[in-house]
Amino acid sequence: MRTEFVDFHCHLDLYPDLKGAIAECEARQTATLAVTTTPKAFPRNRQLASNSEFVHAGLGLHPQLVSERANELSLFEQLLPETRYIGEVGLDAGPRHYRSFEQQRAVFRSILYLCAQAGDKILSVHSVRSAKHVLDLVEEYLPADRGKVVLHWFTGTMSEVRRGVQLGCYFSVNERMLSSLKGRRILCEIPSDRLLTETDGPFVKKSNLPVRPGDVQPALIEMAKIKNIDIKILQDCLLKNLRDIAPPL
């Protein structure tokens, strides 16, 4: 079946039924990156997604969990050859996690170095209150010819958006991001050929219920309105962007 949509950041294993979540992405014909938060979670995600035409599992070590899971970095390195997709990784300088920020930096630096050594990895990157630090580390440790970075739910400044574009980064956008004026301004700053959609389910909610896996159409519709682009043209552009960073999809 032909891919129709892109959900480049969804926590499928945090829904009650992982198999059912994968099936939803397949039913919607949505190419989906199933990000994980710890290396230990990756094997099960990979196993259940292995027969899916649309779902690919990412190997992650979430910055919010680094303080308790940094010892899994060795497992991350061990599992790295088994996937092209990395996520969720990055930095979080929010109040709840700032205490571990230097440890996060060390772990993220190691992940970028390992990915650069391996080559051809595609990373979904978290950057809460830390866009400059993320971009600094990406620039230093992951050259554009050694991997691709997709900045997930980016909330940095306009100059940081432009810097991300200059570094070759892509940006994945969800409908919640577009509910704020800043998020809409960020979208306007991102060239269409660097955009992807995401749900970030189940963390994004609508009517107090988690958005469903692969259900990116509301974000796509809103993005087309904001950018004043025909929705079909934008949809085709996002699919081309996905093929550009992940040719087999």
Image (cartoon, helix red, strand yellow):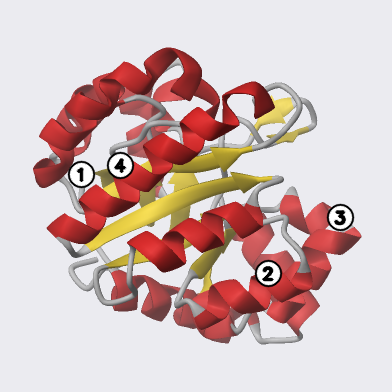
Structural distance between the alpha carbons of marks 2 and 3: 18 Å
Q: Quadrant of residue 242?
A: bottom left
At label 2, the amino acid type is: Glu
Where residue 218 sits, quadrant-wise, is bottom right
Label 3, residues with CA under 10 Å away: few <14, some 14-19, many ≥20: few
How far apart marks 1 and 3 lie (CA) works out to: 34 Å
Would you place residue 118 above or below residue 194 in this image?
above
Q: Secondary structure at mark 4?
A: loop
From the viewer's side, name the closer residue of 57 and 169. 169
Q: Residue at x 77, y 25 (%)?
A: 208
| Residue 181 at x, y percent in the picture | 89, 62
Residue 232 image offset from top left, x and y in percent:
56, 81
At horizontal 10% and vertical 42% (from top left) the residue drawn is: 82
Q: Disc number at residue 180?
A: 3
Which quarter of the rendering shows the N terminus? bottom left
Residue type at numbered disc 4: Gly
Mark 2 vs 4, N-terminal side: 4
Mark 4 packing: few (<14 Cα in 10 Å), some, or many (20+)?
Answer: many
Question: Is 83 rendered above or below residue 231?
Answer: above
Q: Is residue 95 left or right of residue 30?
A: right
Q: Element under label 3?
A: loop
Q: Which residue is mark 4?
A: 58
- For mark 2, what is the residue? 160
Residue under circle 1? 52
Residue pictured at 60% horizontal, 84% vertical: 191
Amino acid under disc 1: Ser
- Give how far apart the Cα atoms at labels 1 and 4 are: 14 Å
Which element carries disc 1, helix, strand or loop?
Answer: loop
Instruction: Say which quadrant the C terminus sits in.
Output: bottom left
Residue type for callout 3: Ser
Q: Is residue 70 above or below residue 106?
A: above
Q: Which mark lies nearer to you, 1 or 3? A: 3
